Structures are given as C-alpha cells and as structure tokens.
Image (spheres, helix red, strand yellow):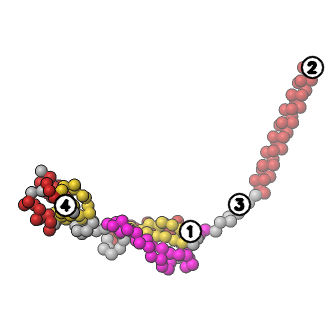
Amino acid sequence: MSSFFIIGTVFTLIYFLSYRSYDRGQEEVVKQDTHPVDTVKEIRVNSSMKYVVENYDGTTGVVTKEEGTVPAKIAGKTREELENYITEYNQQLQEAAIPEAPDSVELISFSKDKVVVRENYLGAEEETGFFIKLQEQEVVIFHNDQVTPYEYTGIREEVLPESELEKLREGFFVEDEKELYSVLENLSS
C-alpha cells in the first residue's frame, strides 16, 4: 500500500511540475505576441472648442462667465502644456504688477469640447481702512467702498452716547484695524 502511495505522489508531482512549466511558456508567448496600441488621441486646444473665461471678483465673490474664441497663443496645446503656460503667465503677472490684469489665472476645465479658464481679481490690496456708520439702529463696519459690510457689531443705537450718534449717522472713515478697534472700544464702554 505504501508503494502505491509513493508512486501516486511521484506522478502527481510530475504532473504538477510539467503543467507549471507549460503555463510559464504560454505566458511568455502571450507577452511576445502582444503589442501595446495607443487608442486615445491626446486632446489639444483647437478653434472648434468652446472657450469660457470666468472672472472672479474677490471683493464681492461674484463669478461672471464670458464665452469667446480660443486665443491663438493657446491653440494646439495639450492640457499639460496649457497648465505650464498658465503657470508661466501667473509668474509674469506677479513680476509685472499690471493694475488691470488679473491677480492669477487658473485652468478650471479641459475637455474635447470646452476649455474653462478663471481669471481671479482678488481686489485692490492697497485699499485700506474702514467706514463706520449707523445702519438700522446698529453700528456697522463697512469696507472702504462704503457698501460692502465688513462686520455687524451688535452695538445698538440706544446704548450710544448722544455725542457719538450724529457722527455715526453720517458715517466716518478709520485708517486701519488698530484705529477701528480703538473706536469700537470707546463705543462699547
């Protein structure tokens, strides 16, 4: 019985090893016969694409969109080439500091049908100061444009001294945060 068991084990090992050897040979044949084929054509910017420019206004948070023709300077570029172009353009913007130019440009979307680019106008950083005014019986701090609220203070008209009310009804400017906090401290005490 034991010799029968040994013979069976030997045949099983021979079968297993021969199958494994055969299987390896087939993998090599398959690898040699296959040739990779690039079926995806790389997308390039062309004149038939929609070109959308989003303008982001950092002071108001509003994004407006304009559709136009593809600029000649980006025509023929791949996504990667366009991203590199925009990076270089942003560096030139920072160095040149042109007042009408956007603060930065970014690629939002790139497909075979459409390219979307966003121009960010973050607002004039040189504008400093605040405008303080009484509005709807509350002291409100505005950016220096006198329209965009900076902060609602919660300081009500009825707790203010009469000497300050006339000045607050007309409104007045303060130059920086230090002066702003000084005024607010005086009003709240």
Q: Are marks 4 and 1 in contact (CB under 8 Å)?
A: no
Q: In the rendered image, which residue does mark 2 sit on? A: 1
Q: Residue at x 77, y 55 (%)?
A: 32
Q: Residue at x 25, y 68 (%)?
A: 147
> Which residue is identified by label 3?
36
Examine the rendered structure and indicate whether residue 24 appears above or below residue 47: above
Q: Check disc 4 and report the residue beneath it.
A: 137
| Residues under numbered marks 4 and 2 in contact, where contact means CB atoms less than 8 Å apart | no
Is residue 175 visible in the rendered image? The answer is no
Q: Is residue 168 left or right of residue 48?
A: left
Query: Which mark, by number, is residue 60?
Result: none
Q: Quadrant where the N terminus lies?
A: top right
Q: Report the Cα–Cα distance between label 2 and label 1.
A: 73 Å
- Local SS, label 2: loop
Which residue is drawn at the image coordinates 87% and 36% (left, top)? 15
Q: Which mark is residue 111?
A: 1
Q: CA–CA distance between discs 4 and 1?
A: 53 Å
Q: Is residue 52 magenta?
A: yes
Circle 3 residues within 10 Å: few <14, some 14–19, many ≥20: few
Helix, strand or loop status at disc 3: loop
State which mark lies toward you, 3 or 4.
4
x, y (%) of residue 85? 46, 69
Mark nearest the camera among 4 and 1 is 4
Magenta residues (range): 42-70
Q: Amino acid at mark 3?
A: Pro
> Which three-letter amino acid code belongs to the residue tagged 4?
Gln
Q: Are marks 2 and 1 in contact (CB under 8 Å)?
A: no
